[in-house]
Image (cartoon, helix red, strand yellow):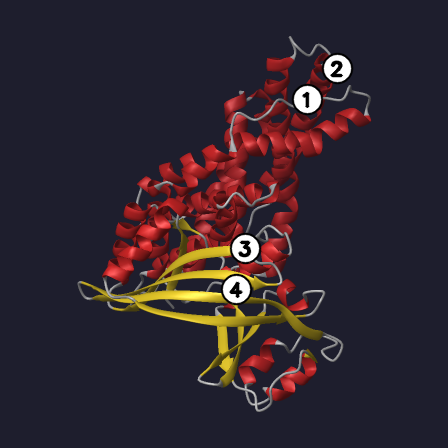
Amino acid sequence: MKLKTIIFQAPKTFQQKLKQALINEGASINSKTLKYYDSNELDLYKLNIFCHSYQDNSQQFHNINIPKLSFSETFQLESILSKQFSLLSFLEGVKDHKSLRQVFKNIKSKDKILLTQIFETTINHLTHLFQFQDTGIEINIRTSQIIEPKQGFELFEVSFSFIEGTYTRFIEFIKNWIEKYHLYFYQYSSIEQSFDLLTAHIPAVCFQTVLKLSPDSSKDATIRKIVENCLEHLLPNISAISIDQFSAEHIHQTRVAIRRLRSALQSFSDWSNDIDPSWKAQLANLFRAFGSTRDRDAISESLLPKLEKIGAPHLELPKSSESSNKILKLIRSYPTQQLLLDLIEFCQNHTESTEKDDLKKSALKQITHLHHLVCKNAEKFLELDIEEKHQIRKRIKRLRYSLEFTSSLFTPKEVASYLKILKPAQEALGQFNDLCVADTMFKSMVEKEPKLWFSLGWIASEQQHILNLIQQNLIKLAQFKFRDH
């Protein structure tokens, strides 16, 4: 199923130009006032469910929207809702809407969840249908203003919807508008933005989800599904960063999502002829942009508290040379936006092949290959130079991600047994890397901060302990062969 609609933000300096461009094309204009309902505890908002009502030709309509499930249903109720009503009474009014009732099936205490109007907003739409060669594309510019209870919040978004034709033309059309009006991804709806603003929340962090593969799919279809799963992890987090409303966890999950993407494209590069070799370098550049931010967070959150606990003097790390403006500029840049669109096009553009692949055999072959690369020097790990040690750390991450991507093809017991052996080695390699980063950082500071000699001594001792632990874990891993029986 193709991704039908892609949402973007535009810099304020380009918003009026963008509106005027649609007006010049004869765009239709309409306005609507919506009232959003939830409990005082925002039970629906916490579940990513949004309920609103509006009037049209003297008739009252209600809508339930669940962005994460791409669910939206509009309906009428026989009676007008009171100012406050229970979720249970609301569902009684829509008992003929089976799909809607299914959405709320697992919510408990429906009679105790009282819904009331949370805010009222006026939304203006500028809409125009473009014909780009053989492809129909609708552009919708949506501006909204919250008028109750807090006035002044104004939101803007522009969406591109694929109506018919060729998906490649759809992506090509969007790229032209991105380049001209400096648009950038923001995969949260304006309603989600409204609730975040009213509650003073930053957008929710998005985590990776379990991927279920079909053993009967072709390798080409499978790598596209894997990339799609990575994008579902990446786009919400990078969207939060793009508007400068993010936490350290958004940064971390963005790095994890990019690393998963790079691992997928490297491990399964021969599964599709449409993989662009340049994506690897572009993703590497994007990954490095978050590097020192992540390293600083890791040292601040895990290592410094541990050092202070054993008696090291309190230390304030120097401010990062990477400003949020630098990261914002990179994320919003045309090359980054173009890369994201290319990846979307890749995972959406697929015609199922009539040729059948032995998917499980192909996945097992790659996992076995990576296992060999990770474990071949297990016995002499301590003798390797620092770069060779870090190469093993990168490979073991790729091994784990490759197994996680394809785990549904194998028996759960075998996967769990293998991961139980693999994870300690990966975690120890990660700890060693953090110690190396801290060692380099502290040595650059020690001339001005002599008190760091205590920490550097402890780091040197801890590095040796961790290296011995890594070797033991790698030897155990080398003795375990991943086989699916």
Distance Cα–Cα, label 3 vs label 2: 53 Å
Which mark lies nearer to you, 4 or 1? Answer: 4
Circle 3: element type: loop
**Quick check: 52 left or right of 9?**
right
Q: Residue at x 54, y 86 (%)?
A: 97
Pinpoint residue 318: horizontal percent, then vertical percent: 62, 22
Which residue type does callout 2 highlight? Phe
The amino acid type, in three-letter code, at marker 4 is Lys
Mark 1 falls on what kind of element?
helix
Residue 454: numbered disc: 2
Which circle's residue, 3 or 2, is located before the other in the chain?
Answer: 3
Left or right position of 9 against 110: left
Mark 4 lies on residue: 68
For disc 1, the marked residue is 464
The answer, for residue 214, to whether it is visible in the render is no
Q: Are marks 4 and 1 in contact (CB under 8 Å)?
A: no
Q: Residue at x 65, y 11 (%)?
A: 446
Tell me if label 4 and label 2 are in contact, CB under 8 Å. Answer: no
State how far apart marks 4 and 2 are (Cα). Answer: 49 Å
Give the labeled residue for mark 3: 152
Left or right position of 446 against 31: right
3 vs 2, front mark: 3
Q: Nearer the viewer, residue 184 or 338?
A: 184
Q: Position of residue 122 (x, y in %)?
A: 49, 66
Q: Residues within 10 Å of mark 3 (few under 14, many from 20)?
A: few
Query: Label 3 amino acid?
Result: Gly
Of labels 1 and 3, the one closer to you: 3
Question: Tags 3 and 4 in contact by the CB under 8 Å rule?
Answer: no
